Amino acid sequence: MIQTSQILETLRMIDQEKLDVRTITMGISLFNCVCDDTKRLASRVYSRIARQAENLVKVGQEIEREFGVPIVNKRISVTPISLITGAVDDPLPVALALDKAAHETGVDFIGGYSALVQKGMTEADKRLIESIPQALSETELMCSSVNVASTKAGIDMDAVRLCGEAIKQLAQRTKDQDGLGCAKLVIFSNAVEDNPFMAGAFHGPGEGDCAVSVGVSGPGVVKRALETVRGASFDVVAETIKKTAFRITRVGQLVAMEASERLGVPFGIVDLSLAPTPAIGDSVAHILEEMGIERCGTHGSTAALALLNDAVKKGGVMASSHVGGLSGAFIPVSEDIGMIEAAACGALTLDKLEAMTCVCSVGLDMIAVPGDTSAATISAIIADEAAIGMINTKTTAVRVIPAPGKQVGDFVEFGGLLGRAPVIPVHPFSSEAFIARGGRIPAPLNSLKN
């Protein structure tokens, strides 16, 4: 059992360096809600979530007060909804039930309006993907994700096309909010089943009835630690990050175990990702710049990010009995003040971000592109990122916002943790014929490991 004394050293990090627990996420299985009547299914989903998560926010607030650890968000993830709507014609009532349950329990977000279509789509999967623009524009707290590729299955290009079209439609439906709806939709390759972070969280079919997981953060803590070894070799840099990640993850382990015990729910995982915010002093980009990169995105940025991601994993994995989720370093442009500055001055481009996703935890995240970007171009961006995940046996993702009415150099404003972002250019040449082919890009040779 972890004792409070074990994290006394981290109190300074909490007070001075913006260390927080970014989320407590309760994963809830909805398989026992399945039925062939839409209204009854929606009612069962609402009741199951409202009953299981009724104390989640209260327990999170109690832990915050007692341990002095800020817990930024309390969230819920559920079974991918396409898996429980096969016997009904319309998933939208379930979307509304999810949002209603999120409001009832007081959580910040609920995730799992999702489909897993890496090898093909059922009719339920297709209906869900096609409903995403309406579902996300008519709900407030619900998030959605689609897994379109995996190393074992390849890339479902028909699903990729549908996702590009859904993103374009969703941006138009939420144009009065700069396309905010797109910030609640993630397209994955190799999605994990225990991710506690939004917008991509869902409670995978391989999970139990319920679990509570924690996502920690702390870019500011790592940045401050590196300031003490300025000019030292990369061996020292890596060791410093590892030790810091260990301390950060111990906080997450403590919170996760306390939440598990108080809620009477099994402990899932600690996701030890460095998740930035738009606040000064809480930036992954500034960590890379502390290593000697003048501006994030210039030459050397990918190598610096690779070191950071690896050292975070090595340090964090020793600090928790169950590490999972995405675990590493996130680079969401609109949510990181250093990334915002780098993109605004042109140092950080879409192509460089794509290169950096080869070595970090997720992918092209919270990136604003011109509003007239075509659905085919968005689909092609998704396909490129899915290919990186497929070939390298890692999770990658795309969360892109084609900002309605905005052009390169304009800004989109979301506020809160979602921040703001400069609109950056995409290539002007067409990918229409490429996306129109459809079918499936086959799995790579390295998938044959049996």
Image (tube, rainbow, N blue to C red):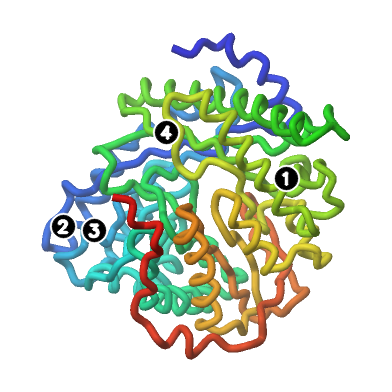
Q: Please, is residue 23 above or below residue 414 in the view?
A: above
Q: Please, is residue 146 above or below residue 379 in the view?
A: above
> Mark 3 sits on what residue?
83
SS for callout 4: strand
> Mark 2 sits on what residue?
40
Residue 336 in the figure: left or right of residue 387: right
- Residue occupying the point 83% across, 55% down: 295
Q: Which mark is residue 269?
A: 4
Upstream in the sequence, badge 4 or badge 2?
A: 2
Upstream in the sequence, badge 1 or badge 2?
A: 2
The answer to whether the residues at label 4 and label 2 have Cβ atoms under 8 Å apart is: no
Amino acid type for the residue under numbered disc 3:
Leu
Q: Dividing the picture into quarters, in which one does residue 137 lie?
A: bottom left
- Residue occupying the point 66% across, 20% down: 10
SS for callout 1: loop
Residue 420 position within the rendered picture, expressed as x and y whole percent measured from the top left: 69, 60
* Label 2 environment density (alpha carbons within 10 Å; few <14, some 14–19, many ≥20): some
Residue 34 position within the rendered picture, expressed as x and y whole percent measured from the top left: 15, 54
Q: How much space separates mark 1 and mark 2, taking CA atoms?
A: 45 Å
The answer to whether the residues at label 1 and label 2 have Cβ atoms under 8 Å apart is: no
Amino acid type for the residue under numbered disc 1:
Ser
SS for callout 2: helix
Upstream in the sequence, badge 3 or badge 1?
A: 3
In front: 408, or 450? 450
Q: Which mark is residue 283?
A: 1
